[in-house]
Amino acid sequence: MPSRDMRRASQKKQESVSDAIEKRHTLHPALYIGTIAILVLTVVTFILAGPGGPMTRGTGSSRGNVVFGSYKGQDIVYTAGGYFAQQYDALKTQAQQQNASTATSDSTSQAVWYQAFINTAEHFAIVDQAQSSGVVVSEDAVDKKLLTYYGYLDENGKFSESRYTAATAADKAATRSLTRENMESDIFVNDVLYGIKDGSKEVDFIKAMAKPERSFSVVSFPFTNFPTEEVRKYGEANKSRFTKIKVSRILVKSSESQATEIRKKIVGKTSTFEELAKTYSKDVYADKGGDMGWRYAYDLEADFDTKDTAQKVLALKAGEVSDVLKGSFGWMVYRCDSEAVDADFNDATVQQDVRTYITTYEKGKIEDYFTSRAAQLSQRSGEIGFDRAVTEMSLKSVPTAFFPVNYYNVFSFAPLAAKNSADTPTNAQYSEDFFIKGFGLATDQVSAPVVLDDQVVVLKLTGQQDLPAATLNLLGSWVTYLASQSVQTDLASSLMTPANLKDDFAATYNTYVAPSTAKQ
């Protein structure tokens, strides 16, 4: 829940907002990137009590206020100076700071409004839980907190009695009520999240899982290096798939009888094919008079349930019009604009088309090819040594940094990476086989091929070391962090249910906000 993240950042004793954010960054940099947008709002939302003005919590909206939904029957109202408005202003400012060019776009505006709505709903949920749990904040505590409310401070940051006196009674009541709510929610969230007790054995188990760190030399066989000669050989062996014909098409989705009537007009020359395509065809070629250009046989086959139907199109002579053919999307009439020809597999454009086909539909053939090459490297390494085998096969090995068993890079502070990050095998962190084979090697031993999504790799173990003390300490903190995140997820799923939250955001936004935004 975003609002809980914000509270946590400001809750720890003697810890400033900037300290909290920096600690989050240190403990889990990857998550920091995704949540910095939320944490930036900490000062606005939880250290300050909120500006004066009508309240957002209540059983009904005031005149001129807009209701976006409700939480357990309490209207979530946007009203000037209220919690919702406070959230919106902070999120809007942040969006402008991050990307001024898109901050005013319709999609960004709607996203800002919706996040403000969700933040407010979560605030309602937390306050509701705090109050129902018996959390009580004394009047003295609220008074003390109000002494730090920015609206009552002078230029030197000290409480100004004159500014307090100048505020209207309604503003004072609103500010006091919202201050109390924030204090109640802070107490509840602090108890829930910081009441978690970490088991030392659990932490030790996680640390043991990550031991030791290892480094490797990696040889990669990327699928993009599939040889042109292999592409040409595949094309020659599958000529029928790459026969090309230039055709135009009319696709009718209503009925076969309408398609038949259209064909009669074409054959009877009462209307041109192009005119009828623009009028009746229901595909992306309609505006071009049905012109599909040159199409490969395999591409045409995708239009039909059987290859035999596609062959009827490929057999057309120049200018000939097909019968009405039942396809996957409706009824079609084709016209041959240029007769079918065999593909020239020495042509660079055709070779690229064949390569794209293999990558899309026959990727296993590329995988088999490079797995065989990788197996050859593994075998030769056992015969003449890894480095000599790499040189003999005109390959390149790259060194990795030290890293632990880190499936999915969950330990973001110890990622799987090559020394030159650009050489890191893509998707290796998501491969169990990579870690099983890599961490099962003895020193200088070479692995069997490891198949990743877009390449095959071979590993040689080059070094092993204990995890640095700093990394071990971070792992302990990571367990605490993960436990806190789990509690947050559980809390969110239990509180923000359809039974509790009535979400009328879309209808309200489109009725009241979007029209005014469009006028700006």
Image (spheres, helix red, strand yellow):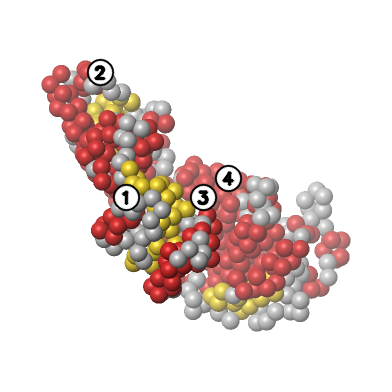
| Residue under pointer 2 | 391
Instruction: Looking at the image, tell me whether mark 2 or mark 3 is earlier in sequence order.
Output: 3
Q: Dot 1: few (<14), some (14–19), or many (≥20) neighbours within 10 Å?
A: many
Q: Are marks 1 and 3 in contact (CB under 8 Å)?
A: no
Residue 192 pos. (x, y %): 47, 64
One can see residue 483 in this view: no
Instruction: Looking at the image, tell me whether mark 4 or mark 1 is earlier in sequence order.
Output: 4
Secondary structure under the numbered disc 1 in the rendered image = helix
Q: Are marks 4 and 2 in contact (CB under 8 Å)?
A: no
Name the amino acid, label 1. Answer: Ala
| Residue under pointer 3 | 34
Instruction: Identify the mark at residue 19; answer none if there is no mark.
Output: 4
Q: Dot 3: few (<14), some (14–19), or many (≥20) neighbours within 10 Å?
A: few
Q: Are marks 4 and 3 in contact (CB under 8 Å)?
A: no
Question: Viewed as shown, does residue 402 lie left or right of 390?
Answer: right
* Quadrant assignment for the C terminus: bottom right
Question: Viewed as shown, does residue 309 lie left or right of 262?
Answer: left
Q: Nearer the viewer, residue 111 or 239?
A: 239
- Residue ID at (53%, 66%): 279
Instruction: Looking at the image, tell me whether mark 2 or mark 1 is earlier in sequence order.
Output: 1
Given this view, does label 2 or label 1 mark the residue nearer the observer?
Answer: 1
Question: Viewed as shown, does residue 78 lie left or right of 206?
Answer: right
Q: Quadrant of residue 85?
A: bottom right
| Residue under pointer 1 | 297
One can see residue 298 in this view: yes
Name the amino acid, label 4. Answer: Asp
Secondary structure under the numbered disc 4 in the rendered image = helix
